[in-house]
Amino acid sequence: MSESNQFRIAFLLCVSLFLWASRVVGQPTPVAPLDSSPSPSPTPAVFSQQTLADLKRLQQAALNSDYAYRQVAHLANNIGPRLSGSAQAAKAVEYVANELKTIGCEVQLEKVMVPHWTRGEETAALVQFPGQANNTTQKIVLCALGASIAVPVNGITAEVVTVKTFDELKAMPRDKVASKIVLFNYPFDKRIAAEGRGGAAYEQAVLYRGGGPVAAARRGHGGGCRSHRRSSPTRAGEDEIDSHTAATARCREL
């Protein structure tokens, strides 16, 4: 088998493992009991020199090929979002299986039970803000994270409180946060990203997307959302709503 096909098999197997792992998110993971015995001796070498050399050649073949990029592009652009239990997730499994079969692998698919979340219709608008014309609102374009819990059927209407960090939120008196919509306006560090450390910049900012609602809920608020500077969901044109500017938003998800 050529190195190119070996690389393709390795890449598709990695994708298959990723798809399988996404199906079992949320299942309890057994934890081994703590072992008070002395530390074991060093693990002997697992791979032979020949295997290591083969892996090195596969790595070089991957670096010299755009195969992985083309596969990822097809999964992302053609098939689209692949939430657990979605039609796109099933299509991705079928696609990877067919690609493996095309290069000579024997493939067997199995039915499994997975958690499933269906996206509703998200709407939001600023209903009271400085400079507002009579009988107008400002539409907010937003997208709920997967597995988000919906607000009540009639939505929520509350004042928006803007903070940049978790520490800033914690420092605020509870009565200034209670029953409010909390907006995390954390700036994405473009300087770090420009230095080639985009992953590090993303890791700093993504904390507020994943942990923002929980942190805000602990302060007794009515809702929570996350934003990076220059992409604020409470923007009106190119203007941002400052943390000291009062605004009221209405959010709804059906």
Image (cartoon, helix red, strand yellow):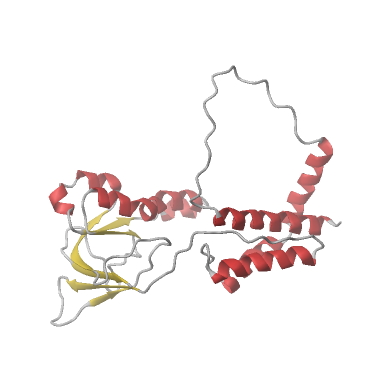
Please determine whether, in this image, residue 87 is positioned above or below residue 104.
Answer: below
Taking the view exactly as shown, the residue that stands out farthest to the top is: 38
Please determine whether, in this image, residue 140 is positioned above or below residue 221.
Answer: below
**Of residues 7 and 100, the one drawn nearer to the viewer in this rendering:** 100
Q: Is residue 196 visible?
A: yes
* Count of picture labels: 0
Q: Position of residue 134 (x, y in %)?
A: 13, 82
Q: Position of residue 28 (x, y in %)?
A: 50, 45
Quarter of the figure that contains the C terminus: bottom left
Q: Is residue 70 visible?
A: no
Drawn side of residue 113 relative to residue 15, left or right: left
Question: Which residue appears at 42% of the width and 69% of the height?
Answer: 119
Quarter of the figure that contains the N terminus: bottom right
Drawn side of residue 177 relative to residue 79, left or right: left
Q: Which picture quadrant has residue 19?
A: bottom right
Q: Position of residue 84 (x, y in %)?
A: 52, 62
Question: Which residue appears at 72% of the width and 55% of the height?
Answer: 62
Please determine whether, in this image, residue 203 is positioned above or below residue 159.
Answer: above
Q: Which picture quadrant has residue 87?
A: bottom right
Question: Which residue appears at 55% of the width and 56% of the height?
Answer: 22
Q: Position of residue 192 (x, y in %)?
A: 45, 50
Question: Which residue appears at 23% of the width and 65% of the height?
Answer: 241
Taking the view exactly as shown, the residue that stands out farthest to the right is: 1
